Image (cartoon, rainbow, N blue to C red):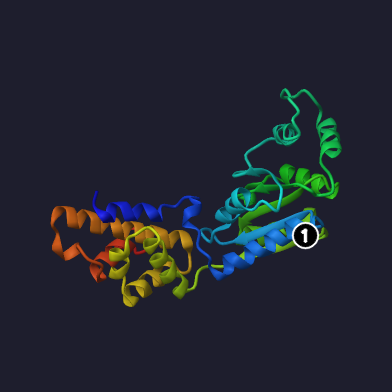
């Protein structure tokens, strides 16, 4: 297989923890979140950030890698109704529960018997999609200190939600994830390639190329990966088909990658 075809898969937009990158913002947010989870005195923790800054990766990393905290459940999307949500949480205590076997009040009462003092944490990603009823249910469970909740959401919507009466008057912690600096974007691309034995490709990226990518990525981790993956696919095709003009990283191939990624409107 062409080396570019292999290398481009390193920049797929997924939660592969081998792609861990220690940006300053990520490391600070990770430490804040772990510290807050270990203390067990914060019922509600909000992880805010623009799309593509690594909120989901952060939750996934802690869920899979950090053994010093207890994550009871990780909901990747808040698509659930009240009963299913409570039944899922109660099943974590080893209870075999049939749907609609208990009332909402009984489910909450049983949860309180099995979980308390914020010992266990529930992650909810894309929490800006929570309905009013779901938000109220989370408020009830957190107020009774049954579970600690970590709600990851887009920054704009998160700031709006935090002003709601459900949360405004309650003890909570806010953690913000910022974008990558231009230098971090370059370090990420280089380190990802070198760590996977693509030193020849890593050497092709000059400072001007990394500056070009950073200009259009605007600090966004997801966008950075999309640009690099598209660029490597262009190089893959060009080298396979013998298009010499597009077989190296240059202004032409970088511009094509940015256009294909949808960051430049050519209409």
Please determine whether, in this image, residue 117 is positioned above or below residue 200: above
Is residue 107 or residue 3 the one in the foreground?
Answer: 3
Which image quarter is the C terminus in? bottom left
How far across and how far down the image is residue 239, in percent?
A: 18, 57
Please determine whether, in this image, residue 87 is positioned above or below residue 188: above
Quarter of the image for residue 203 reads: bottom left
Residue 164 in sight: no
How far across and how far down the image is residue 103, in percent?
A: 81, 28
How far across and how far down the image is residue 55, in percent?
A: 58, 57
Q: Is residue 109 left or right of 68 when viewed as pictured? A: right
Is residue 77 or residue 182 the one in the foreground?
Answer: 182
* Residue tagged 1: 172
Residue 187 in sight: yes
Q: Is residue 60 left or right of 182 when viewed as pictured? A: right
Q: Residue at left 66%, top 37%? A: 80
Residue sticking out furthest to the bottom: 208
How far across and how far down the image is residue 36, in percent?
A: 74, 60
- Neighbourhood count class around disc 1 (C-alpha, 10 Å): few under 14, some 14–19, many 20 upward: some
Q: Residue at left 48%, top 50%? A: 16
Q: Residue at left 25%, top 70%? A: 250
Please determine whether, in this image, residue 100 is positioned above or below residue 33: above
Q: Is residue 55 left or right of 137 when viewed as pictured? A: left
Please determine whether, in this image, residue 1 is positioned above or below residue 207: above
Does dot 1 land on a helix, a strand or a loop? strand
């Amino acid at each position: 297989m062409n080396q570019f075809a292999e290398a481009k898969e390193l920049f797929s937009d997924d939660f592969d923890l081998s792609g861990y990158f220690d940006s300053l913002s990520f490391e600070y947010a990770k430490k804040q979140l772990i510290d807050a989870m270990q203390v067990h005195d914060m019922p509600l923790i909000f992880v805010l950030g623009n799309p593509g800054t690594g909120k989901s990766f952060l939750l996934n990393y802690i869920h899979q890698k950090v053994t010093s905290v207890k994550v009871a459940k990780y909901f990747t999307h808040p698509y659930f109704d009240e009963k299913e949500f409570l039944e899922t949480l109660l099943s974590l205590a080893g209870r075999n529960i049939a749907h609609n076997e208990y009332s909402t009040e009984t489910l909450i009462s049983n949860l309180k018997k099995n979980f308390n003092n914020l010992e266990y944490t529930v992650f909810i990603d894309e929490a800006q999609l929570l309905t009013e009823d779901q938000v109220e249910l989370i408020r009830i469970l957190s107020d009774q200190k049954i579970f600690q909740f970590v709600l990851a959401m887009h920054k704009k919507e998160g700031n709006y939600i935090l002003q709601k009466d459900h949360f405004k008057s309650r003890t909570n912690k806010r953690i913000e994830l910022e974008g990558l600096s231009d230098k971090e974007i370059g370090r990420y691309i280089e380190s990802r390639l070198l760590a996977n034995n693509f030193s020849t490709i890593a050497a092709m990226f000059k400072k001007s190329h990394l500056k070009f990518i950073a200009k259009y990525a605007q600090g966004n981790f997801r966008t950075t990966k999309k640009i690099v993956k598209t660029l490597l696919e262009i190089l893959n095709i060009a080298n396979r088909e013998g298009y010499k003009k597009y077989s190296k990283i240059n202004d032409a191939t970088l511009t094509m990658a940015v256009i294909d990624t949808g960051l430049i409107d050519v209409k």
